[in-house]
Image (cartoon, helix red, strand yellow):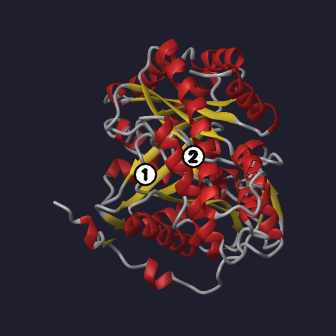
Amino acid sequence: MINLSEVIETNKMILEENLDVRTITMGVSLLDCTDASLSRTCENVSAKLKRLAGRLVKTGDEIGREFGVPIVNKRIAVTPMSLVGAACCRRPSDFVRLAKTLDRAAKSLGVNFIGGYSAVVSKGMTPADELLIRSIPAAMAATERVCSSVNVGSTKTGLDMDAVRLMGEIVKETAERTKDRGSIGCAKLVVLCNAPDDNPFMAGAFHGVTEGDAVINVGVSGPGVVHAVLKECRGADFETLCETIKKTAFKITRVGQLVAQEASRRLGVPFGIIDLSLAPTPAVGDSVADILKEIGLEHPGAPGTTAALALLNDQVKKGGVMASSYVGGLSGAFIPVSEDQGMIDAVNAGALTIEKLEAMTCVCSVGLDMIAVPGDTSAASISGIIADEAAIGMVNQKTTAVRIIPVAGRRVGDNVNFGGLLGHAPVMKVSKFSCERMIARKGRIPAPIHSFRN
């Protein structure tokens, strides 16, 4: 039974500590929209999205007003489009036409992003997969709300290094195609290992083939809330620290559970999962970096950073799984540089480097996220960074990702503004040493020995 003190506490979290439901994401299967005709496929996609998601934004707004909980984003995730377009797309431009169809649907429905312009190529690429991947630069340049992701490996299959090499080239081309907008196309493109089928957060969201016809997934966020409660236990021992984070994560997740169940009921779509990630924003006071500083670091990147982040991530998960029976997606702490003012400050102070961020991704929920690098960074170096991050995910049986932006015309120390929730980022230094001969090798890196569990 909810008592008055809990209501007051939740209101304080919302009004003073930036608690929000970051996204209601409707996953929609488009497998039944495929047709040998590209025109009919586009028509089918538009019709199904309108039929299932036509009330998504209105319903989210209504729930937000009635419950007094800010619901920041309403989004859609669809079946990986390499599967949807396999029967009708014969060239990259055909896939771009599908991307434009998704973009028009997103605009008409009022959602801010639609994810699923994706291919899952953990073990190899079909012709359709490769066509979609090669179409990504043109698709990101021609659309505003479409997000793209490519899964290049998994613990079970190893890493498809042919896809890794290709994605380095694709990231570079996407940056060039959108150079007039700060290479923003790369901010809508992520390369993953062990991508989950039910992630509600962009840019990596897609509706996996293990899912039903439609589902409601909700992502909650509350780094400001965690930061606020930790201020009250400064100097406490680690047990007290962990208990405080865990209890706070429980409360945050319960808010998301309530919203998810209500959205499911009103839309007539099954409830899928709660993603209980601590997802920061550029707003002051809504920062994972500030939590790490409250734990005792001068800046993220200082000695002890990886341990502090591991503690935070683990306690968030422990609190969340007690609050909901259906926790999924990524769930934990996000460390996107451009979307977290504390991380930006750490980079500018010289405390945080790409190499330290990579170490931190071993223990958090995602990977190298929203990192701006010099525009002249080579495709091979980008592929090497992708391979490193994917290897961490593969060996540690976790999701990792790379969303890296080689900003055309920018150098180390420059700043690029992406706007809105994407924030702004200092351009970070990349190792000058080459990995070209390694990336030029063909084939796959085999799965680790612990993947063999039959």
Assign a secondary structure to mark 1: loop
User: How far from the left and from the top, in percent, is residue 316?
Assistant: 56, 50
Report the residue at 38% width, 79% height from top: 441
Q: Is residue 402 visible?
A: yes
Q: Residues within 10 Å of mark 1 (few under 14, many from 20)?
A: many
Considering only vertical position in the picture, is 164 above or below 291?
Answer: below
**Residue 439 left/right relative to 242:** left
Q: Residues within 10 Å of mark 2 (few under 14, many from 20)?
A: many
Residue 258 figure quarter: top right
Q: Which dot marks residue 203? A: 2
Considering only vertical position in the picture, is 185 above or below 165?
Answer: above
Quadrant holding the C terminus: bottom left
Q: Which dot marks residue 41? A: none
Report the residue at 71% width, 36% height from top: 19
Residue corresponding to mark 1? 195
Identify which residue, 132 or 9, lies in the foreground.
9
Marks 2 and 1 sit apart, C-alpha to C-alpha, by 11 Å
Report the residue at 29% width, 62% height from top: 157
Identify which residue, 105 or 77, lies in the foreground.
77
User: How far from the left and from the top, in percent, is residue 112?
Assistant: 65, 32
Identify which residue, 175 or 413, lies in the foreground.
413
User: How far from the left and from the top, in percent, is residue 322?
Assistant: 47, 40
> Along the polypeptide, which appears first: circle 2 or circle 1?
1
The amino acid sitting under disc 2 is Ala
The amino acid sitting under disc 1 is Ala
**Residue 238 left/right relative to 383:** right
Quadrant holding the N terminus: top right
Q: Are marks 2 and 1 in contact (CB under 8 Å)?
A: no
Residue 5 figure quarter: top right
Assign a secondary structure to mark 2: loop
**Residue 290 left/right relative to 174:** right
